Image (cartoon, grey):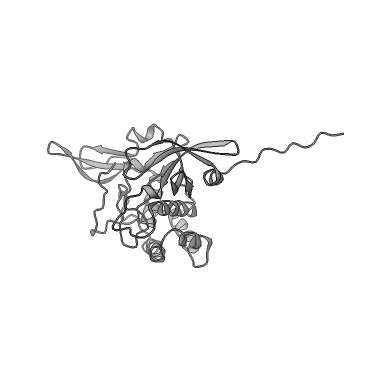
Amino acid sequence: MSAPERIPPRSVTPHELLTLGELTVRGRVREASNAVLYCTVEYEGVSAACVYKPVAGERPLWDFPDGTLAQREVAAYELSEAMGWGLVPPTVLRDGPYGEGMVQLWVEASEDAADGRLLALVDGEEPGQGWKAVGFADVGEERTALLVHADDERLRRLAVLDAVINNGDRKGGHLLPAADGRLYAIDHGVTFNADDKLRTLLWGWAGEPLPEEAIEALRRLSADLADGSRLAGRLAELITPAEISALRERVADLLRTGRHREPSGQWPAIPWPPV
């Protein structure tokens, strides 16, 4: 008699872990302006670190009167996935110890986040090879330095994603290079406004032609945003009809121009503080 076939344990997806797992609060991220809780989540023997941002801990914003920061964080993840770039860590909307909120897989930044490989201040008026200029910054004692970011395809994809989601707060501290070489981006609560709010440190490609991979991703996204699509239905649960309409217009405009966004001149182009 043969031995029964052994069934390998089922793998738990990040979405299942974050959605169905038990959340345990371990501490609070003090630097954040809204409530950001460091947690662990466990489901069917699998555990991971995560961030939990309860809606109850959000401070109201006059220019974002509808919806919640948590909903927009999830919408940003949905757009990142739809574009095929995986720039935003897995993110869900669920109930937690302090009510409904955003739960996002914790990403541990590698040393790249601190050694100047993505952002830097340099002397002179030219960025140097491998860098893109953003603008001049006051560094005190009546001195200025040139703010630059790496000429990195990961950052270039993020610049396109930020233009799509209308990110009003892309700071240096939101960039997380992981040990496996991937780049993740976090903190997407001030996104999807129907008005132009784009503020970012990633202006180095402003006005330049979009790479072909970005054009292809935008074409797919345009189709995925059609009425009746799964993505459109999901976004309708997270942001307003006016914001969805503006999102479609931004995608269409990027495809029409075929170029990276440039500062509008009607809104501060760089967030403050920039880190």
Question: What is the residue that sits farthest to the right in this orientation?
Answer: 1
Let me know if residue 186 appears in the view.
yes
Q: Nearer the viewer, residue 206 or 233?
A: 233
Seen at 60% across and 39% down, the residue is: 44
Question: What is the residue that sits farthest to the left in this orientation?
Answer: 142
Quarter of image, res 198: bottom left
* Place of residue 124 in the rendered image (x, y in percent of width and height, measured from the top left): 20, 39
Seen at 29% across and 58% down, the residue is: 63
Q: Is residue 30 left or right of residue 96?
A: left
Q: Is residue 199 left or right of residue 176?
A: left
Quadrant for the N terminus in the image: top right
Quadrant for the C terminus in the image: top left
Q: Nearer the viewer, residue 59 or 31?
A: 59
* Place of residue 53 in the rendered image (x, y in percent of width and height, measured from the top left): 41, 45
Seen at 34% across and 62% down, the residue is: 194
Q: Is residue 57 left or right of residue 273?
A: right
Let me know if residue 91 appears in the view.
no
* Place of residue 137 in the rendered image (x, y in percent of width and height, measured from the top left): 20, 43
* Place of residue 99 in the rendered image (x, y in percent of width and height, measured from the top left): 44, 48
